Each structure stands twice: as structure tokens, then as C-alpha cells.
Amino acid sequence: MELFEAIPDVLLVLECGEERLLALTEVERVKALAAQLVKLLRAQRDSGFAVSQLLSEYSKTFGYSLRLQDYDAATLPALLNKLCHVVKVNVISFHCTDKPP
């Protein structure tokens, strides 16, 4: 356990009664999520998709739901803001008669 306590910038040692639990720091959780999103985006035909599809695409790809609270984000835009170094959100306007890009 001392080894894990020696790397506090990566791992947190949480105490729950007599039990000790390991957890990634928020910075490391965000890094891991960024890597997952890169993988997800690269798998798309145009290296992107609508923000409204993110949660379902994530769940389909990784087999579990993306939980915003795991990243201290209340909303999807707040989470994407934390990932601005990895994810670029473009606003694309089109008329109802147009096909989406």
C-alpha cells in the first residue's frame, strides 16, 4: 500500500472503515476518458458524430454507460469542456429540408 501512497498524483487511497480503496485522481480519470474518446472518434467514418449520440455510442463501444458524476461533471457540455484538449465541438447549422452532414 505504501507504493500506491507514493504516487498521489495518479492514485488516491481512500479509507472506508478498515478497508482501503484505490481510485484514480480526477486528472487521471479524465486522461483515461480522453483516450477512450479518441478511440471512439477514430472508429467513426468521419472521425466524429453528433454530441447527442455520444452517450449511446460510448455505451455501445465500451459496454457500460458514461457516468458524468465520475468526472465531476453535471452536464455533458461541462464534461466536454474538461476534454477540450481532445474533443472539438463544432456547431453545424442546417435547414429542416437539408440532410445533416
Image (cartoon, rainbow, N blue to C red):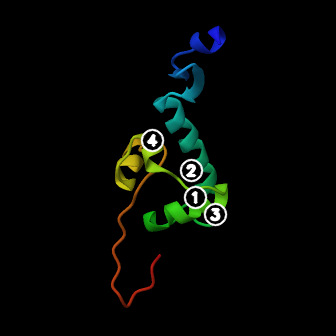
**Residue where numbered disc 4 is placed:** 71
Tell whether label 2 touches label 1 (CB within 8 Å): yes
Q: Amino acid at mark 2?
A: Leu
**Residue placed farthest to the bottom in the image?**
97
Front disc: 1 or 2: 1
Q: Amino acid at mark 3?
A: Lys
Q: Tell me: 6 left or right of 30.
A: right
Question: What whole-number distance in Å separates the C-alpha atoms at marks 3 and 4?
Answer: 20 Å
- Tell me where residue 72 sits by quadrant: top left
Task: Provide the secondary structure element on which disc 4 rests.
Answer: helix
**Residue where numbered disc 1 is placed:** 58
Asked if one can make out residue 43 in the rendered structure from this viewpoint, the answer is no
Question: What whole-number distance in Å separates the C-alpha atoms at marks 1 and 2?
Answer: 8 Å
Q: Which residue is more in the foreground, 4 or 89?
A: 4
Tell whether label 3 touches label 1 (CB within 8 Å): yes
Sequence-first tag of 4 and 1: 1
The x and y percentages for residue 60 are 63, 63
The x and y percentages for residue 20 are 59, 21
Q: Amino acid at mark 4?
A: Tyr
| Res. 37 mark | 2
**Residue where numbered disc 3 is placed:** 60
Q: Amino acid at mark 1?
A: Tyr
Front disc: 3 or 2: 3
Residue at the spot 65% in from the left edge and 11% down from the top edge: 3
Sequence-first tag of 2 and 4: 2
Question: What whole-number distance in Å separates the C-alpha atoms at marks 2 and 4?
Answer: 14 Å
